């Protein structure tokens, strides 16, 4: 029933941001009080006893999910942002998307060396963004405990790419297609 609730609250927008992409939009899930609570409760239950030191969220929806989960778990939160958005000294990582490429950054002192990090975002598609974020976390000395997503698009293979790099992947729901 819970997965049905979540999938029913996620909107699909065809041909966004370009032709052929079926964009899975969680803003409709986030605006629903019960849906948002269910997502955070499910993640909280999954990770409440995990050896996590900090939660890192990928801009922008990962900020929303990661902040709420960090609060629920009593952990700190680290933002991973698009290039040029963080004010302090940063390190950068380029990555490929399903529909282009981009650069993300993290403060060079955002994560203590050896800290266990839960990386969170709204969706795993081709895995480029998450793999870029994993690289950043590891460059500054963090250890990725697990990657977590609301949505997996298994046909695009991102979760498999992350697993093939030796990292665990968790998603609340999966959608067929792009």
Image (cartoon, rainbow, N blue to C red):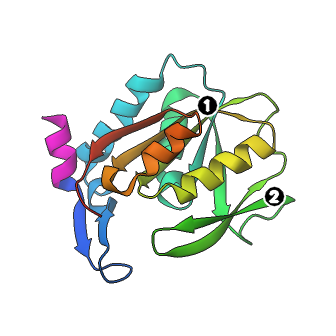
Q: Is residue 156 above or below residue 162?
A: below
x%, y% of residue 106?
74, 55
* Mark 1 → mark 2, Cα distance in angstroms: 23 Å
- For label 1, the SS is loop
**Residue at horizontal 35 percent and vertical 49 percent from the top:** 152
Foreground of the two, 15 or 35: 15
Q: Which image quarter holds the C terminus?
A: bottom left
Sequence order check: which comes first, mark 1 or mark 2? Answer: 1
Side of 132 relative to 128 (left or right): right
Tags 1 and 2 touching, CB below 8 Å = no
Q: Is residue 52 above or below residue 69?
A: above
Q: Is residue 118 above or below residue 51?
A: below
x%, y% of residue 151?
34, 49
**Residue at horizontal 56 percent and vertical 52 percent from the top:** 130
Give the crowd class for mark 2: few <14, some 14-19, many >=20 residues within 10 Å.
some
Side of 74 relative to 103 (left or right): left
* Residue interval drawn in magenta: 1-8
x%, y% of residue 128?
55, 59
Task: Please tell me the numbered disc located at residue 16.
Answer: none
x%, y% of residue 45?
38, 23
Side of 105 relative to 123 (left or right): right
**Residue at horizontal 25 percent and vertical 46 percent from the top:** 35
Foreground of the two, 26 or 164: 164
Q: Nearer the viewer, mark 1 or mark 2?
A: 2
Does the magenta-highlighted stretch encompass residue 107?
A: no
Does the magenta-highlighted stretch encompass residue 6?
A: yes
Task: Please tell me the numbered disc located at residue 75.
Answer: 1
For disc 2, the marked residue is 91
- For label 2, the SS is strand
Foreground of the two, 90 or 74: 90
């Amino acid at each position: 029933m819970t997965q049905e609730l979540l999938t029913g609250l996620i909107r699909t927008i065809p041909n966004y941001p370009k032709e052929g992409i079926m964009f899975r939009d969680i803003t409709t899930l986030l605006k629903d009080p019960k849906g948002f609570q269910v997502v955070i409760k499910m993640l909280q239950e999954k990770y409440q006893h995990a050896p996590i030191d900090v939660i890192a969220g990928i801009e922008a929806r990962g900020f929303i999910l990661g902040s709420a989960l960090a609060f629920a778990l009593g952990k700190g939160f680290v933002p991973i942002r698009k290039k040029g958005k963080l004010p302090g000294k940063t390190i950068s990582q380029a990555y490929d998307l399903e529909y282009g490429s981009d650069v993300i950054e993290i403060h060079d002192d955002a994560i203590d060396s050896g800290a266990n990090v839960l990386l969170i975002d709204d969706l795993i598609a081709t895995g480029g963004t998450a793999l870029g974020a994993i690289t950043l976390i590891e460059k500054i000395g963090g250890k990725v405990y697990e990657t977590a997503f609301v949505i997996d698009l298994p046909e695009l293979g991102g979760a498999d790419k992350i697993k093939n790099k030796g990292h665990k992947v968790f998603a609340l729901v999966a959608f067929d297609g792009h």
